[in-house]
Image (spheres, grey):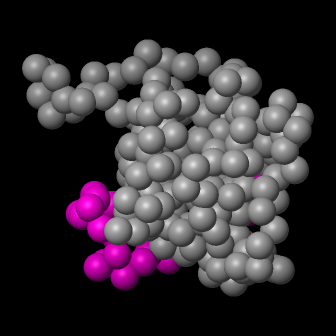
């Protein structure tokens, strides 16, 4: 298992997006920080994933597609667009993936790759926000469009429904580490429901 944190928009949205992906074992909603000048707490999710089932490249492509990853809006302190990783080798790999997707799409991402220096959980009453009541107006307005985008462009990455074998979805075949597909990365700048 590997761990990273992702920030970019409202953590209620980011939590629901990554809870929907196969290979993601645990998603914690809260606040992440890095080294100065990015040491202030910013909304994020911390997730644990199986790299044999879900590649870092796919995680980055999903992240860029599901938040305003090209917007330099005034709320970037609260909603820092970032990929937080603990080890320098992971950060180098993530930076290459980010650069490759930028080249493929022509997008000027504000998303940065930063050292993971801390994570603090959200108040319990806000955790699993979409899962506990998907009919809330916020969920329908901001989260559901991101999940629709996942179903449209990243369907092969979604968790499979439980089958006759029991509550766990069958294991996905191992995915090689490969560049994100052009179809997945096109139009990242205008993701539906993108919210700071």
Q: Mark yes or no: residue 148 visible.
A: yes
Q: Whole-percent x and y of residue 107? A: 84, 44
Residue at figure coordinates x 47%, y 61% from the top left: 142
Q: From the image, which quarter does the C terminus lie in?
A: bottom right
Q: Whole-percent x and y of residue 93? A: 77, 39
Q: Which region of the structure is painted magenta?
A: 112-136
State whether residue 115 is above or below residue 118.
above
Which of 169 and 90 lies nearest the eye of the viewer?
169
Q: Whole-percent x and y of residue 162? A: 19, 29
Q: Whole-percent x and y of residue 143? A: 44, 57
Residue at figure coordinates x 45%, y 28% from the top left: 155
State which quadrant residue 86 falls in.
bottom right
Tally of numbered discs: 0
Left or right for 17, reference 100 = left
State which quadrant residue 20 falls in.
top left
Residue at figure coordinates x 39%, y 20% from the top left: 172
Which of 127 and 54 lies nearest the eye of the viewer?
127
Residue at figure coordinates x 66%, y 39% from the top left: 61
Based on the picture, tell me whether residue 88 belongs to the magenta stretch.
no
């Amino acid at each position: 298992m590997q761990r990273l944190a992702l920030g970019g928009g409202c953590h209620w949205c980011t939590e629901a997006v990554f809870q929907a992906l196969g290979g993601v074992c645990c998603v914690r909603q809260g606040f992440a920080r890095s080294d100065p000048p990015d040491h202030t707490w910013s909304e994020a999710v911390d997730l644990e994933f199986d790299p044999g089932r879900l590649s870092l490249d796919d995680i980055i492509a999903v992240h860029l597609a599901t938040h305003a990853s090209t917007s330099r809006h005034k709320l970037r302190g609260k909603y820092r667009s970032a990929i937080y990783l603990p080890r320098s080798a992971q950060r180098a790999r993530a930076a290459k993936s980010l650069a490759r997707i930028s080249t493929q799409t022509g997008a000027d991402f504000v998303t940065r790759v930063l050292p993971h220096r801390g994570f603090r959980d959200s108040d319990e009453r806000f955790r699993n926000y979409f899962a506990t009541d998907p009919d809330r107006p916020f969920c329908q307005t901001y989260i559901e469009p991101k999940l629709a985008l996942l179903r449209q462009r990243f369907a092969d990455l979604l968790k499979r429904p439980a089958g006759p074998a029991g509550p766990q979805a069958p294991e996905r075949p191992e995915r090689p580490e490969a560049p994100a597909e052009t179809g997945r990365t096109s139009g990242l700048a205008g993701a539906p429901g993108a919210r700071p």
